[in-house]
Amino acid sequence: MGGNIWFGEMIHMKKLLLGTVCAAVMASAAAVVPAHAQSKGSVEVMHWWTSGGEAAAVGVLKQDLESKGVTWQDMPVAGGAGEAAMTALRARVTSGNPPTAAQLLGMSLRAWAEEGFLGDLSEVAEPEGWDSVIPEPLQAFAKYDGHYVAAPVNIHRPNWLWSNAKIFQDNGLTPPKTWEEFNQVADALKAKGIQPLAHGGQNWQDTTIFDDVVLGIGGPEFYQKAIIEADPEALGSDTMVQVFDQMRKIRGYVDPNFSGRDWNLATAMVINGEAAMQLMGDWAKGEIIAAGKVPGVDILCTTAPGTEGSFLFNTDFFAMFDVGEERKPAQLIMASAAMSPSFQETFNLAKGSIPARTDVPGDKFDACGKQSMADIKAAQEKGTLMGSLAHGHAQPPAIQGAIFDVVTNHFNSDQSSADAAKALVDAVAAAQ
Amino acid sequence: MASTENPAGRRSLLPKFVLAPSVLMVLVGVYGFMLFSVILSFTSSKMFPRFAFSGLDQYERLFSNPRWSVAVQNIFIFASLYIVLATALGLLLAILIDQKIRAESVFRTVFLYPMALSFIVTGVIWQWLLNPGLGIERVMQSWGWESFSFKWLVEPDMAIYTVVIAGVWQVTGFVMAMFLAGLRGINGEILSAARMDGAPTRKIYTRIIIPALRPVFLTAFVIESHLAIKSYDLVVALTKGGPGYATELPSTFMYTTTFTRNEMGLGAASAVVMLIALAIIIVPYLYSELRNERRG
Amino acid sequence: MSAVAEHTVAEPRLRSGAAFDIARFAVYAILIVMAAVFLMPLVSMAFTSLKSMDEIRGGNLLAPPMAVTLDAWYSAWGSACISVDCSGLKGYFYNSIKLVVPAVLISVMLGALNGYVLTKWRFRGDDLLFGAMMFGCFIPFQIVLIPMAFTLGKIGLAGSTAGLVLVHVVYGVCFTTLFFRNFYVAVPDELVKAARMDGAGFWQIFFRVLLPVSWPIVVVAVIWQFTGIWNDFLFGASFAGGQSQPITVALNNLVNTSTGVKLYNVDMAAAMITAAPTILIYLFLGRFFLRGLMAGAVKG
């Protein structure tokens, strides 16, 4: 094995260590390769949108950039909300070779910004007026130290309740609007031998429900205090004990084989009528559409019980790394393209979310998407547009993880609600 | 030990020169990086290494962390069952295969192939097979055994045993191969002599054959225990640490803490504890192996 | 089959009779049941990969496919979308080969040389050095990610196949050294002495005396390294550039989707394609593996 095998890699190599024989060989290899004539450079993008609709969605951006003369180098690493991607990203940055852009969720975006690895997008953000079109709670993540470091591409809403329309119609029920109603509906379904709730026992899914219950029982102020501010008093309060009581009730509405189930299998249970409801974000639409059903018609979308008027968000950002002058122009083209209204529309139609900018017309979106767009406007005005804890927009990973542990442990054991609330206070304190 | 004496001159440097690249790699890649972890464990590093020393804080946090206690408890359950079952099953299969059977190589390959597969490849199918609603339970019930129940995967107290099953499935073939190699290395004359004396088969196995396999037991034990401590893919593929965090192991704890939760100092502390555990098992083994060799 | 492999410790089959037949029957029965259990995951994967999605949704995991279709296999190999690239696993398959071949060759070569030096050119502290190298076999890989990334960056190999090869060599050489050292320690020193009398030097002794008898352990080392490196995900995901990602990373990207729709038949076909090289190696070299183990890797 000699030059042949490694030749291709040498060309791609970004950093050459001068002064070694090795580097001299590589440099001469690189010099042989003709530069692309009209190329405006390339972007290397790390993300975990690797299959199905989301891959197609990101493909839209790739094509758009290629039409502008920017080459797209893909660096996909999938796995549980980007866990493996985060490791790979850390390795890349540690080796002094960051990608141009990386998909990040709110709190990890902030962590990367605080570490000082991200670039400055002011050159495109200011003339394009990003400030006036991006909702403020998203800006809080996309900006660091007064300037943009990332481009938000979508807004997912995790606080949805998906219901099988036929089951509800056949049994003369309507999707519940409060947690009390939810318990009544679930009991009624259970009495008829219908599985009330489809759920997958993975910590982020448990916590998605937990978010809904905290918001639904405690209201937006309580969510703000307990989840966003991690206020120990709120975390240990009686309201939190009630939240855990409701979590315990919900546990009773889930089938015995829920452990470890992927969310999409739970969605399939609702689609096939094996269960009546699922509490899940709007990415569930992808599964529903793929199964030939219409979201909002066959599978109803309503806000999770008690959360009407509030909007939890989960946004994917393209964080732009500080890459140096050579790669910067292509990076700015990418940032601008990712924020363009036409891309945001196409991308979010494919992904099931809504655009991260408020000036995109909603007429092409389905009923659930339209409702999302209307609800976010209302929530923005009321100040109830808040980050989702389960999806990395409320607490830094250490505290988020600590809460995951408590929530999932309570959900999977006989722990009392009071003990769980106490454990929550302790775990959050220990993680700070 | 009859060692070759070094001829004088330039040549005597050559062997060391040949060894040097590997020594350098191991020095940096193993010991350098271990030292790095040890140092990190005394710092408050979060997302990236930061050398702000915080004494034993991370160790205190580690030992008061309920998830870590579950992980430690699990590694004892997992490792002991994994080692005992894999060794017993491996030995049994080796003895059976050694009975001059037909199609020996077919059986050997069947038992050995799981070793060729990583859980990246087989993880999904294992999840399905162990899932009561999809896998073995449903299959048995659909074949008419209505009362068949196999729900370990979804029971917090039992889920760790499913991890044992998959782990044993993967490693048993390798253990079998080692025992088979050991069996076939036993001096045939001793056995013939014992048979001549009319010793019953069971006695030959318990008195002669199994004692003769002592070194294989030891090697198998060391290989199994280090695989157990390093087991990571297995848990991630099967249970992702769930239900709850009931199947967390030190290796998954270390990874999640360091890379998902940005607590590099705490992760490093858990890594150091793992390394110490490994050293306790392996160093005495290495020591006795090398000493025996010198004596022998 | 070698003479060693033919030698079993079981009692020679001389007698016959009812009791004896029952015992033989039990041996086969246990082996066949165990074999069925061991094969279950693979069979189930194969069946699923040959079914259509409709049949999978409705069916039994262990039921053979009613309508066999190879669509999922074609798709997984050549047209399944992995992120923005819809050309299946084939490109990644070659990436893995480009990675595995040099990594296996280098680590096995180094292991052989190390084993040779450590047994035939002994020096003060060689056992200590060997013990220290062996402990390297046992290091959990998760802990080396960050310092390794830093080191690769410093030497200019970040994000390249060359860097990934280096990583696999570093952590593979411990194992290969162990195999070869344990093998060469059993090769009589007299052979080496005789060769030296004839004027053979360091390299001549290695190539003419030791290497020719080494093939059983070479097979063990190659199988071990090939399987380990081919199956690696952690290093591949962390250190490969986007253009050089190995097949396990691609498989993971195909199978693991956070918010996408899953095609299980394609997932299973992709898993089988990923596993094919290592399974084939065990199928064809499995018996040499056993022979190699007997010859030295295991002392018994």
Image (spheres, rainbow, N blue to C red):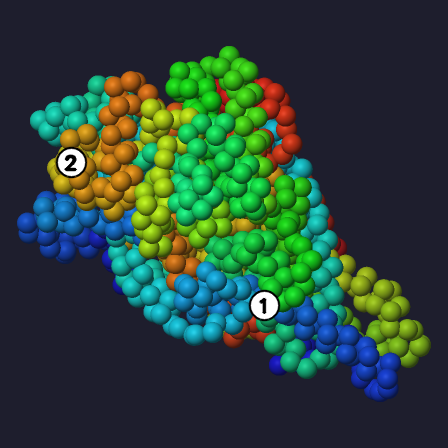
Q: What is the x, y in percent for residue B224?
A: 65, 52
Using the image as rendered, state which of residue A270 and residue B281 is in the foreground. A270
Residue C127 visible in the shown view: no
Callout 2, which amino acid? Pro
Provide the chain ID for the residue under circle 1: C
Q: What is the x, y in percent for residue B294?
A: 71, 54
Q: Horizontally, is A348 left or right of A269 in the view?
A: left
Q: Is residue B33 above or below residue A298?
A: above
Cα–Cα span, label 2 and label 1: 55 Å
Quadrant of the drawing holding the C terminus of chain C: bottom right
Q: Residues within 10 Å of mark 2 (few under 14, many from 20)?
A: few
Same-chain status of marks 2 and 1? no
Residue placed at 77% from the left, 59% from the top?
B214
Q: Which mark is residue C158?
A: none
Q: What is the x, y in percent for residue C131?
A: 61, 48
Residue C255 visible in the shown view: yes
Provide the chain ID for the residue under circle 2: A
Q: Horizontally, is A285 left or right of B168 in the view?
A: left
Q: Is residue B165 above or below residue A255?
A: below
- What kind of element bears circle 2? loop
Callout 1, which amino acid? Leu
Q: Quadrant of residue B277?
A: top right
Residue matched to label 1:
C39
Residue matched to label 2:
A361
- What kind of element bears circle 1? helix
Q: Residues within 10 Å of mark 1 (few under 14, many from 20)?
A: some
Quadrant of the drawing holding the N terminus of chain C: bottom right
